[in-house]
Image (cartoon, rainbow, N blue to C red):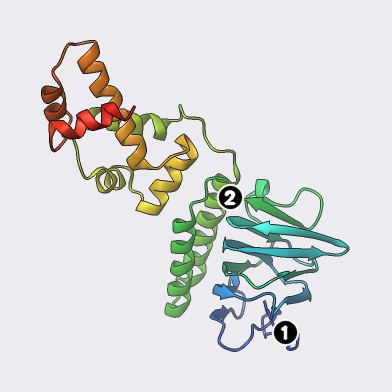
Amino acid sequence: MMENASSEIPASNGTLSPPPGRPNWAGYGDLPLIYLGWGERDFATFPLPQHSDPGTNYFVLLRGSVVVVTGDLSQTMRAPAALLVVPGTSFSIRQNRINPVEVLVWVWRGRPEIPELAPKKAGHVVIPLTHSPLDFLAYLHVQCRKEVSLADASLPSTLSALRSLMEVELLRASRPTPAAGDVRWALTHAWLAKNLAIRATVPALCDYLDMSPSTLTRFFLDQTGTTPGKFFRKLKLEEAKRLITENGWQVKAAAHHLGYKHPNDLSRALRGQ
């Protein structure tokens, strides 16, 4: 791929070479992976010209917005989202104004291995990543770069495995946000209810769910519309009110039981309701 319209020179693998200084990797021979690109882009100054790739282009927009043009049609794509373009489909990417854009790009040989990801009608599809595992996609991209740097006899097999993981994550992320009663959320809610006295909530939840703090925040925003800390404080306060009003606990006893540093902290929280 290439962002500089003034240098539309195909690389040896059939893709377009990016402007100087743009991090990328171009494949060779019969490897399943044809191209990798990553980092910040400026599609206003260096638009990606109309072209078609020899494999399926997986363009993941981590930050910002771009305009995707195919034939006479143009479509605004806003992060987090993924663009899939199958081989032989001509497309271009531009920006109407300069704004921060960050991308991950894979070009894999052939069409998508998971049929649900393949465009249904046109040669491309824009997929909003409704509960996007961006951290894991970034990790997979890094792993692809590590594997191609090793370039040993296992490379074709490891790349194929990484492609399968990438497609599965894109498919999961493209589906509607799970309902609040799904297994992971049920486990999360049950864990919170049993650990209301804990103070370092976010690190403990990250360890329990094997999530990074940023992924945990996105997970809670998807499920509750608020952050982990705010949701935890709400649960804690609801339990305090239940203990006091229904079970007749004193404020001091409820505060101690729920891990408040001082009874006055609970009293102020109750007055703020």
Mark 1 vs 2: CB contact within 8 A: no
Q: Is residue 30 left or right of residue 54?
A: left
Which of the numbered marks, if any, corresponds to residue 126? none
Question: At 47% across and 65% down in the image, what residue appears?
Answer: 158
Density class for disc 1 (Cα within 10 Å; few <14, some 14-19, many ≥20) is some
Q: Quadrant of residue 252?
A: top left
Rendered image: mark on residue 129:
2
Which label is found at residue 10?
1
* Image location (x, y in percent) of residue 134: 49, 56
For marks 1 and 2 on the same chain, the one whose residue lies earlier in the sequence:
1
What residue type is disc 1 on? Answer: Pro
79 vs 54, left or right, is left
Amino acid at circle 2: Leu
In the image, residue 129 sits, relative to residue 159, either above or below, namely above
* Closest to the observer, 74 or 251: 251
Task: Say which residue appears at 57% left-offset and 82% top-offset.
Answer: 22
Residue 257, above or below 134? above
Extreme-right residue of the structure: 72
